[in-house]
């Protein structure tokens, strides 16, 4: 299976590069070699490799900056995604794309399923939702995995920030009214690779048969404040911490340019029922991620 991976330096793309290698040649790219904001330059690369599968791990992910850069967010998250779907159809390649819990408004109060109506609160969520819709409209062989609260230990993430704060602050205040599923980039990439392995050599048709949007995130949900507490609990270098208390705060205590959904937990049953497995509990993944850091 010939795979093109876009976004190889991102949190998820970095892990995907490793997880996909056993499945066939992986041709991996990122900025500045490619630019999803100017995707026509990608065409010769796609034609050269004639991929069976295109995996898009690129995105404009700066949630707050997107509020003042909507054109760029839409160029990458909508136009870029649509371009890849067009190219995938033209080359008879399957496409795997990632989307976000931020397409929901956070008002539901129980984990969101794929049947719940999206209603993004900000430009980032709007641009990702319109990217999903562009792919769905073009088809014909795609999987869209909506994930949430992705972290890795090799670049800045909520987990690395909490670890850093714990070395410099005795008291931390962390919002307790945002609830979601923490997702370690490595387990998300390994689950993606397992799905692809099921397709074997028949990638286009197999993905076409299973095509659609699936929620795929760490099992279980938690508030950011309790997630921060768990990060400090599982930190293998606890002796370096000077933090003694973590106090709950409200999202409204820390105004940001973008509104975020307060409750964006994802129900991943459809993925589990379709592909026969699920991501591990978020606590287990966090413990492993920290032990391996
Ligand atoms: N992070 C989260 O909490 C989260 C939550 C839900 C869903 N997701 C989704 O999961 C996927 C992976 O996210 P992630 O956390 O791995 O994101 P990430 O770490 O920000 O990685 C995105 C990658 O895309 C690259 N990129 C940005 N603009 C580009 C462009 N114009 N052309 C080509 N490449 C470009 C980035 O390069 P630079 O670093 O140079 O900009 C980076 O390497 C995305 O679809 C995201 O929307 C993420």
Image (cartoon, rainbow, N blue to C red):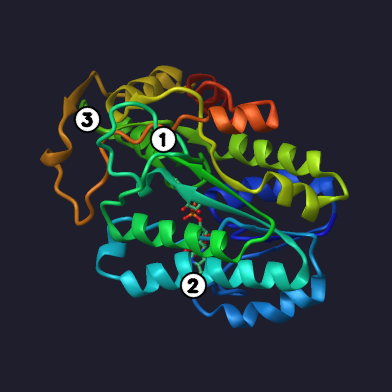
Return the residue at label 3. Answer: 177
The answer to whether residue 109 is left or right of residue 233 is left
Q: CA distance from mark 3 to mark 2?
A: 33 Å
Q: Quadrant of the C terminus?
A: top right
Q: Is residue 88 above or below residue 41?
A: above
For residue 159, which numbered disc appears in the image?
Answer: 1
Q: Which residue is located at x 60 percent, y 52 percent?
A: 13
Please tell me which residue lies in front, 122 or 166.
122
Return the residue at label 2. Answer: 79
Q: Which residue is located at x 58 percent, y 56 percent?
A: 57
Query: From this viewpoint, is residue 42 visible?
Result: yes
Question: x, y percentage for residue 259?
Answer: 22, 50
Q: Secondary structure at mark 1?
A: helix
The answer to whether residue 136 is left or right of residue 239 is right
Q: Which residue is located at x 72 percent, y 39 percent?
A: 195
Q: CA distance from mark 1 to mark 2?
A: 31 Å
Q: Is residue 39 above or below residue 206?
A: below
Task: Look at the numbered discs 3 and 2 and tell me whether their residues touch, using CB distance below 8 Å.
Answer: no
Mark 1 CB within 8 Å of ligand 1: no
Q: Residues within 10 Å of mark 3 (few under 14, many from 20)?
A: some
The mark that comes first in sequence, 3 or 2, is 2
Question: x, y percentage for residue 166?
Answer: 31, 29
For residue 179, which numbered disc appears in the image?
Answer: none
Q: Which residue is located at x 37 percent, y 22 percent?
A: 232
Query: Of the residues tagged 3 and 2, which is closer to the observer?
Result: 2
Q: Residues within 10 Å of mark 2 (few under 14, many from 20)?
A: many
Please tell me which residue lies in front, 221 or 134.
134
Q: Is residue 180 above or below residue 252?
A: above
Query: From this viewpoint, is residue 293 visible?
Result: no
The mark that comes first in sequence, 1 or 2, is 2
The mark that comes first in sequence, 3 or 1, is 1
């Amino acid at each position: 299976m010939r795979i093109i991976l876009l976004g190889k330096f991102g949190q998820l793309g970095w892990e995907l590069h490793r997880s996909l290698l056993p499945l066939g040649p992986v041709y991996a790219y990122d900025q500045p070699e490619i630019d999803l904001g100017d995707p026509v330059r990608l065409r010769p690369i796609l034609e050269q490799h004639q991929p069976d599968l295109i995996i898009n791990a690129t995105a404009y992910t700066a949630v707050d900056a997107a509020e003042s850069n909507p054109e760029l967010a839409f160029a990458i998250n909508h136009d870029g995604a649509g371009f890849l779907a067009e190219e995938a159809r033209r080359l008879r390649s399957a496409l795997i794309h990632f989307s976000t819990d931020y397409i929901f408004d956070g008002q539901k109060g129980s984990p969101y399923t794929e049947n719940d109506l999206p209603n993004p609160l900000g430009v980032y969520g709007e641009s990702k939702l319109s990217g999903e819709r562009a792919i769905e409209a073009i088809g014909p062989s795609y999987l869209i995995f909506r994930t949430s609260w992705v972290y890795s230990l090799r670049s800045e993430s909520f987990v690395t920030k909490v670890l850093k704060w714990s070395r410099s602050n005795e008291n931390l205040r962390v919002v307790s009214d945002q609830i979601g599923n923490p997702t370690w980039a490595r387990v998300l990439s390994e689950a993606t690779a397992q799905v692809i392995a099921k397709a074997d050599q028949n990638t286009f048709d197999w993905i076409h048969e299973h095509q659609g949007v699936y929620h795929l995130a760490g099992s279980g949900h938690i508030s950011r404040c309790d997630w921060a507490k768990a990060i400090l609990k599982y930190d293998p270098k606890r002796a370096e911490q000077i933090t003694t208390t973590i106090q709950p705060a409200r999202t409204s205590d820390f105004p940001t340019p973008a509104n975020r959904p307060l409750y964006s937990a994802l129900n991943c049953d459809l993925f589990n029922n379709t592909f026969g497995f699920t991501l591990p509990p978020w606590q287990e993944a966090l413990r492993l991620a920290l032990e391996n850091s």
